[in-house]
Amino acid sequence: METPQTIKGTVITGVIGEDVHITGIRILEHALESAGFRVVSLGIHTSQEDFVNAAIETKANAILVSSLAGHAGAMASGLEEKCIEAGLKDVRLYIGGMLAVDEPKWEDTQKKFKEMGFDRVYPPFTLPGRVIADLEADLSVQRRGASGSD
Amino acid sequence: MGLTLAIDFGSTYTKAVAVDLADENLLGVAQAASTVDTDITLGLHEALQRLEKTVGVKNLNPERTLACSSAAGGLRLVAIGLVRVLTTKAAEEAALGAGAKLVGTFSYGLSPDDVRQIEQMKPDLMLLAGGTDGGNEETILQNAALLAACPIRTPVILAGNKMAAHRARSLLESGGKEVVVVANVLPELDKLNVEPTRAAIRETFMRRIVHAKGLDRAQDIVGNIIMPTPMAALEGARLLAEGAGEEEGLGELMIVDVGGATTDVHSVARGAPSHDDVIMKGLPEPYVKRTVEGDLGIRYNAESILEIAGKVRIEKGMLFSRDLLPKQTDLGTAVKYLSRNIGAVPGNEEEFAIDIGLASAAVDIATRRHAGVIEEAYFPTGRVRIQRGKDLTSTKRIIGTGGVFAYGREPRRVLEAASYDPKNPESLRPVAPEFFIDERYILFAVGLLAGDAPAEALRIMKKHLKRV
């Protein structure tokens, strides 16, 4: 197991709401672990509260939300506000998958989720490498202001 | 080993059990009113004298005496964690598993009001958790600093994020607190680690709390009081389930203990899902799990049972007697009487029936709170079942312990309330269990003996488990 000194960051992963599509996030989890991240995997059918609680206890750097059921808009709405209430203002929020079934233009979907507070929004068929690169970039910015531990 | 005594200093009674470990015989059981407020040894001497009469031996000269205690308010513990459903719940599980009485539970950063409340609760022990290993550090440090500054002189067990443990210890010690640091009770979100905390609670109980409560006067007679009574019962349950060496245990089991003030449920079971398509959610559950329902007891809390369960449920429990229709009983008045006369012993058919009705309602509610639940969700891809808590459906044995089973009537009726109910299929309680009672009320004694003579203690327990 990796020691906290060597990890690049802690990320919470899970499939939000009433959704059982686990394959995509499992592939991403393996890639993230290989890349040196500590992954706290919540699996399918994860509520917003579960994401927030896990992020508090593990001092996560990012929450990675997966959704393939096509109604992520309804299920992920309010997550940013819950994070703010819980004092997680520095936690990055990512979301990816089949986020909407009724919007033909990806730009519209992306815009909608950015407005909901997600820092990164990924369409279907995004490769893990892109998420890892984004995380590394985002967390290195975050870490500049962070305090050390013993 | 020959004659061995096991003593329980209970809140109401001091109980004494004599066994012959060489012959594996239960020699006798006796009890007397506890005398914690005056001199604990008075009640002890009385119980021992009665035991001598029961056994038929003058001047019992035991080779060994073992004792546990829940007297003087029990082991009063305040648990503090970070997230309510995560480290706070993990701390609660560990504390209950150590036989503690949870007098307060706090989550997130403590406020000055919280700290004042803790002071008023007069705990014997504080358990401070928070953060998985490598996780949140701020909250446990902030809470340690606040507790360090408050006047409570109660030992603190630190069982939180290992990255913050040393700084939290220094903070507390600088405030003059005694601190015991143990491994994180929730090192990762999906790993519960209650054993180090349980061991530290027990050790602190023996070393500090027995003395602080003035129970140590009894130790000249009985030797060290080695654990809180509920922990002894849990150890008895564990031994009975797991067996000892060649002597086989009964396998996974559930124990219910209906008292005047509370109803305890213990399960020694993994509680894993019984089907492949079930997804687990929520905190992992301890293999040896204890829950205490502070609102369910057939004397002090008789009115509370009536309020929660309702008249119909209690009457259902009373219906075993055909010529005693509930209509003839004014349940409300009877229950009120019991709650104000906590020493009341049933004297006629009706009073026995009311006790059975109350006890079976208490057992029903307490086991529903203890066991896990399953819910079904349907997706375009099919059905998914989500389980929270322990699946006890395949648990084969339910055992009743405590007064209502040892001295009451219709114990099977009361125990049946602990099993699976087709009307509440979401509650994962035992589907087709066998029912037993701890006929002589010796489970605590067996738990006390489990450390030194497990096989002998187990065989004695088996002899006095009565199938009902």
Image (cartoon, coloured by chain):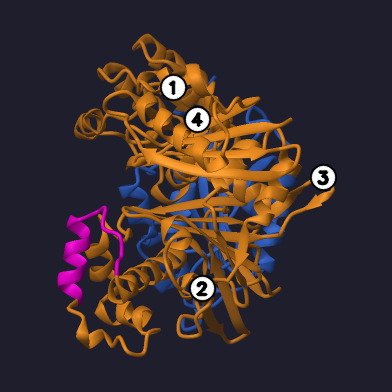
Q: Which residue is mark 1?
A: B218
Dot 2 and dot 3 residues touching (CB under 8 Å)? no
Could you tell me residue B279's position as x and y percent?
61, 68
Q: Position of residue A46 (x, y in %)?
A: 51, 64
Q: Do the residues indicated by labels 1 and 3 lie within the same chain of the protein?
A: yes
Q: Secondary structure at mark 4?
A: helix
Same subunit, labels 3 and 4: the answer reads yes
Which dot marks residue B245?
3
Q: Residue at x 63, y 31 (%)?
A: A4
Q: On the picture, is B267 further left or further right than B363?
A: right
**Circle 4 marks a residue in which chain?**
B
Label 1 SS = helix
Tell me the tag on residue B412.
2
Q: Based on the picture, tell me whether residue B454 belongs to the magenta stretch.
A: no
Between residue A32 and residue B455, name the one nearer to us.
B455
Instruction: Residue type at mark 1: give it.
Output: Ala
Which circle's residue, 1 or 4, is located before the other in the chain? 4
Instruction: Locate the C terminus of chain B by quadrant.
Output: bottom right
Disc 4 to disc 2: CB gap under 8 Å: no
The boundaries of the magenta stretch are B331-347
Query: Which mark is first along the chain, 3 or 2?
Result: 3
Q: Is B308 rendered above or below residue A140?
A: below
